[in-house]
Image (cartoon, rainbow, N blue to C red):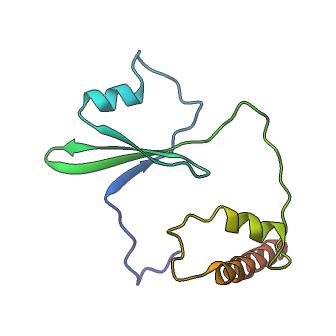
Amino acid sequence: MADKSREPIRTGDIDLMVNPGLPVIGSKTVDQLLVEAGFQPNFKGREIHPVICYEGNIDGHEVEIEFITDQRGAKEDVVLEVNFSSLTSNGVLLLLSQRPSADFPNLDDEQFKQYVLGTFQEFIGEIKSF
């Protein structure tokens, strides 16, 4: 993370995550204000954290403003215990079932499961060492 010899990854958008407890000021929503300013809303994803992107122009520059939201349902949160003990463990199969089709295009399902298993076993090992 602190490797100063490498060029940081840069994107052309602005990402914002807003605390749900942020006080409302005025009568208009952020969506209404951005649309009135000429931005077009574009819903980008239904993953764990849905993303709404507003695309528009500021002083002659194309701009994307992304809001990453918490996905909250009407029901209480449920804790799901998963494990990563083998290629057929529930954690590996859960991640395989949630894999977006464009992610890791050079890996077939078996290779992806191997990758997930190795990555999470290493990660869990590091956490346990604290």
Q: Relative to 66, is 99 on the left or the right?
A: right
Quadrant of the snapshot with the C terminus: bottom right
Residue at 69% across / 63% down in the picture?
97
Q: Nearer the viewer, residue 129 or 95?
A: 95
Residue 26 lies, with reference to residue 8, above or below; the image says: above
Quarter holding residue 98: bottom right
Residue 102 drawn at (x, y percent): 49, 68
Residue at 42% across / 24% down in the picture?
29
Q: Nearer the viewer, residue 121 or 74?
A: 74
Residue 103 lies, with reference to residue 25, above or below; the image says: below
How many marks can you see? 0
Residue at 43% across / 79% down in the picture?
4
Residue 36 drawn at (x, y percent): 27, 27
Residue 18 drawn at (x, y percent): 52, 39
Quarter holding residue 128: bottom right
Residue at 13% across / 47% down in the picture?
60
Residue 93 lies, with reference to residue 49, above or below; the image says: below
Q: Nearer the viewer, residue 125 or 4?
A: 125
